Amino acid sequence: MSLDAVLSRIDTDLPAATDRLIELLRIPSISTDPAYKAECERAADWLVEDLKSIGVDAEKRPTPGHPMVVGHVDGPGPHILFYGHYDVQPVDPLNLWDREPFDPAIEETPKGKVIRGRGAADDKGQLMTFIEACRAWKAEHGSLPCKITFFLEGEEESGSPSLVPFMKENAEELTSELALICDTGLFQSKTPAIMTMLRGLLGEEVTITGPSKDLHSGMYGGIAMNPARVLTRILGKLFDDDGRIQVPELYEGVPELTPEIKAQWEGLGFDDKAFLGDVGLSIPAGEKDVTPLEMIWARPTAEINGIWSGYTGEGFKTVLPSEAHAKISFRLVGTQDPEAIRKNFRAWLEAQVPADCKVTWTDHSCSPASQMETTHPAFEAARKALSDEWPDPAAYAGCGGSIPIAGYFKKILGMDAMLVGWGKDDDQIHSPNEKYDLESFHKGTRSWARILAAMSA
Ligand code: BES
Ligand code: ZN
């Protein structure tokens, strides 16, 4: 079956494909905020209808949280599963957006055309590249080149609470030869990359309570312990001067890189000056004697994602707050055990809290790192297919972010997963003014057509 015809169909259909993506982007499917529950349903319904329009037997499947979209379509080639997520991150701070986050549009920028709006890159634009490739294939040839199961989730951005039970309950239906995941990016915004390592994630929220109520800092300051002082003093000790995290046993399970991987990564020519320069920085902040790329792909981190206490509004208030809070996350690598780190972190922090302050915890995300197996012949086939589409040959790469499902495919369904995606470093995912380059959308769709052709060959 001719690939060229599919590729030119993708080229001529680009404006219509963009319109479809814009329609999906108009639905504010923010999974973490219960106020948007109906919108998540609406996004799932939209995808079911769109999949049906290309001949996929698709339906919305309920979970205790937001629904999954599952679809099947037959084809001659191998049975593959495609995973993407239709939920998006909250939009705050809204005042930093240059347009309404759910009023998406094509914008001209000095670097070319972009589709601007929440979810454009993470992950609606990306998941639509695969669906658009299938649409073009179907239009050109009347059927698809592979047997495909579509598996679209609506809770990825809030830690996928329904995912594992759903995968277990529907194991037989979901199991196929290989999973394709489109939720990552190009290396240095230009080199197509197959991700072989993803970091895990552990999220913790701590509240330290001091006095039983907010106090006047003149009346009580000096005699009453301030919980913000307790919290900042402890968090100030999270790293030593060499950038090492001080939680006991945290580095257990952090592997040394093999000389082969080190050499391969060295060969990628990562430009950390440009990477940091794009965000107004210049000095890598990780451990001493660790290369910049290893800091993102192969080392654990601890990040304070949010910290608040006392009065943070306009003007000034001489308050001695009753509570101090922080949200802290750890990115994990190798075989680091999220539960052990949770336990050790809590013990480490609690041991430093004065006797008359109280600590309470809320647990958030928890998933180990994953290492992808790349021996399935589809990997080399995809690498070649990608190298035909992009100016640079495709590379195997690490990924600093976390996609817990990548590991679950192996653990629960015994399947390998191949992670490719078309995002760029400046897409501002999770941030104001998120965008997806029209080039990512267009060449991403073409790339999937090439990968499908290569896999069915
Ligand atoms: N698409 C991202 C993962 C990602 C981030 C890939 C950066 C490449 C670069 C995904 O939607 C995501 O944001 N995942 C969360 C994890 C989740 C458990 C909240 C993350 O990495 O923070
Ligand atoms: Zn995300």
Image (tube, helix red, strand yellow):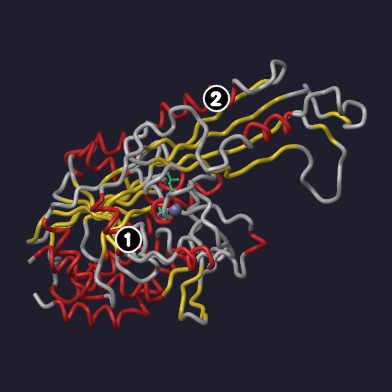
Of the pair 63 and 221, the residue shown nearer to us: 221
- Disc 1 to disc 2, C-alpha distance: 36 Å
Q: Is residue 263 left or right of residue 217?
A: left
Residue 381 in the image, given as x and y percentages of width and height: 14, 64
The answer to whether residue 41 is visible is: no
**Disc 2, SS:** helix
Q: Residues within 10 Å of mark 2 (few under 14, many from 20)?
A: some
Residue 125 picture quarter:
bottom left
Residue 326 in the image, given as x and y percentages of width and height: 62, 37
Q: Is residue 229 left or right of residue 340?
A: right
**The N terminus - image quarter:** bottom left
**Tag on residue 266?**
1
Q: Relative to 149, does residue 304 appear above or below in the rendering?
A: above
Q: Residues within 10 Å of mark 1 (few under 14, many from 20)?
A: few
Of the pair 64 and 380, the residue shown nearer to us: 380
Residue type pointed to by label 2: Trp
Q: Residue at x 37, y 76 (%)?
A: 439
**Quick check: marks 1 and 2 in contact, CB under 8 Å?**
no
Q: Is residue 292 left or right of residue 50?
A: right
**Tag on residue 348?**
2
Q: Residue furthest front?
A: 289
Nearest to N terminus: mark 1 or mark 2? 1
Residue 436 in the image, given as x and y percentages of width and height: 44, 69
Q: Nearer the viewer, mark 1 or mark 2?
A: 1
Residue 112 in the image, given as x and y percentages of width and height: 46, 81
**Disc 1, SS:** helix
Residue type pointed to by label 1: Glu
